[in-house]
Amino acid sequence: MASRLYAWARWMVRRRRWVIATWILLLAVVGGLGATLSGKTSTQFTIPGVEAQEAQDLLKEKFPPAAGGVVRIVVAAPEGKTVTDPEQRKALDGVLREAAAVEGVIDVSRPAEAGAVSSDRTIAYADVRFRDEAPEVTEEAKEELAATVEPLRDTGMQVELGGSAMLPQTEAGGPAELVGVVIAFVVLAVTLGSVVAAGLPLLTALLGVAVGVLGTMFVSRFVEMTGTATVLALMIGLAVGIDYALFVISRHREQLADPDTDWEESIARATATAGSAVVFAGTTVVIALAALAITGIPFLTIMGLAGAVTVLIAVLVAVSLLPAVLGVFGERMRPRHPRRKGGRENRAPGSWGLAWARGVTRTPAVVLVAGVLGLLALALPAKDLRLGLPSYASQPESSTQHKSFDLLTEGFGPGFNATLITVVDTEGIPRGERQGAVTQLRGALVADGNVAAVSPPVTAPSGGVVVMAVMPKSSPDAEATTDLVHRMRDRAPEIADAGGALYVTGQTAMAIDVADKLGDALPLFLGVIVLLALVLLAIAFRSVLVPLKAALGFLLSVGASLGASVWVFQEGHLNGLLDVAAVGPVTSFLPILLTGVLFGLAMDYEVFLVSRMREHYEHSKDPAEAIARGVSSSAHVIVAAALIMVAVFGGFVFNEDPIVKAIGFSLAFGVFVDAFVVRMTLVPAAMALLGRRAWSMPRRLDRILPDVDIEGARLPAPAGRATGPEAEEEAPHREPAARV
């Protein structure tokens, strides 16, 4: 691999103007398509085949009005008044008449007639039902409806909007995310010792991310995807794009510190060595994200593919655009104070990385046991992990969705926001027995200890479907509500024996079904990821023990990150600091997403760290010295790369969307733990205990696995700085001035 990338990089450098122009043209074309022909992203996380979705499909076919999206207008009377006072009632009736005229609305309920007034008559609600399903209700219609209710505020009433059609769009790119980019620039400037050099990774990463994200927006025109898919592509693409460029530029400047090194030779060699690690590590990220498709869950598959394509673009940028850009800067990338020949080896013993490595390997068993126990302690809260989707209680406290949730809870009890829809398909039941079967079912539901109320049965015009709303006593995120859904579904055999079918749906039931499906898919996905790690690292390092050690470290990182997520989002710690509006289950697809993304990023650091160890081991055959030198030569880059990722992911923690917030926190925490505890601490300790055995490989297995050279062992000997007429002819722009 290294030899091919070496030749590839030279080709890129010598045709740098064409390469840069091609990338700019690609950005212009993809950007134009993404900006002008993007599709509409969904706010719904649904899975075909689960019971809640089957019920929605049945309603759409046989009882379309019941399947339409709802905007719930929630009103609270001014202090000292009620919503049934003449002035308030008159204003509300007028607004509801206007709401009925909004395009797409097919029905508007009246609070007094529907029993939608609280017992103290201070809070009421009206449901505005649309013809289209919730994801299809247009923003224009919702904005028109929001404008329609404004006169109610003139009477002193509080007015908030909720309902299935009011799920907010996921967005990114706010001030908090920009802070992460600024921190990344500072880290780059300190690490590379140059403002110009620090700007290059940001420049190339932003170009790659722009191509990936805008391309994803264009694809959304043809494929249904959630807004989270675009945010995930931005989040991961930006982090790995900066890191991959950092790895190559850092190696390039390290080589240029030798005044005898030709800058073109250095670009080619940096792309061949660090670039090989980038390609290998990037491939693991791409495969891990694409492997989300094995879950069989469409929205998760799309999210994984969107992230995978963006990472693939980041890899291509690092090994094509970046060498070309480095070629433009040429000699100006050389450090201001190049070392004298042999200076690197003389300065190495004083480096902090070398001191850290020798400190860790002085008592490796103690370090390993302490580190593992510490990570297991962090992972301990994960034993109580509960999965779900955020309710409106998780939206920012200033949002109308959160306020409507609070008002309904205050007026009608915590279970009102968890209302479940029971759908009975009665077509197979003899007509004379239908009413009896439904009445018996309703009686059983009313008798359940966690049911506050059951609405009267509503029959579809065709007569084949009956719908009842069931209000629990517990909140949407409570475990008791999940148990109630399962008990309701346990009644299905009774209806089936009569010839019908029973379904339970609604937002709460859908969230439960999605969580169950994703929970079942997690073990399979985790097994595939661990197996993938073993195979890829065995190919990379010609070793059996190194991949086993890496996989175990990865599992510790995932466990610690999940434990921290449970501690924060499910148990409610640090809520004020992180601006978490309400505690609740962990986002249902977070464990699988975290596993895939963190696997790829963990393998990044494993490859960059262990490849330098192997590079030194190939020269010295001394395992202890290889560990020390490998950590010394890669520590500053890995630390900088990890800080950049933590900063980028951490910026998304302050996004208002609860799902994005949870993803940003878990990835930031996971990367921090994996880089600083697992890779920089546990890996050197484990390698010290393994000694020469770390690099052993059974002969039969060694013959089967392909030989991938990512350390550049078969590269030609380094060429000196070109001089004379030939050098001028090949690179007339090389000037020794303006070093950075």
Image (cartoon, helix red, strand yellow):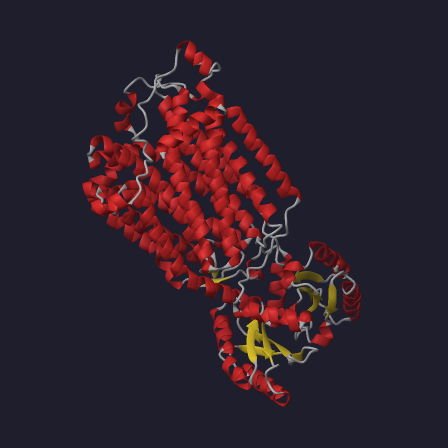
Query: Quadrant of the rendered structure where residue 706 is?
Result: top left
- Nearer the observer, 126 or 300: 300
Q: Is residue 402 above or below residue 463?
A: above
> From this viewpoint, is residue 570 visible?
yes
Residue at the bottom extreme of this rendering? 432
Relative to residue 517, is residue 114 drawn left or right?
A: right
Residue 325 placement (x, y as % from top left): 49, 26
Q: Quadrant of the N terminus?
A: top left
Relative to residue 93, is residue 216 drawn left or right?
A: left
Name the residue rendered at 41%, 21% in the picture.
263
Residue 351 placement (x, y as % from top left): 30, 29
Residue 21 placement (x, y as % from top left): 56, 28
Query: Quadrant of the rendered structure where residue 7 is?
Result: top left
Name the residue rendered at 56%, 39% in the picture.
210
Residue at the top extreme of this rendering? 725
Q: Quadrant of the C terminus?
A: top left
> Tag count in the figure?
0
Query: Quadrant of the rendered structure where residue 712 is?
Result: top left
Residue 730 placement (x, y as % from top left): 45, 16
Q: Is residue 582 above or below residue 107?
A: above
Q: Is residue 556 above or below residue 253?
A: below
> From this viewpoint, is residue 543 visible?
no
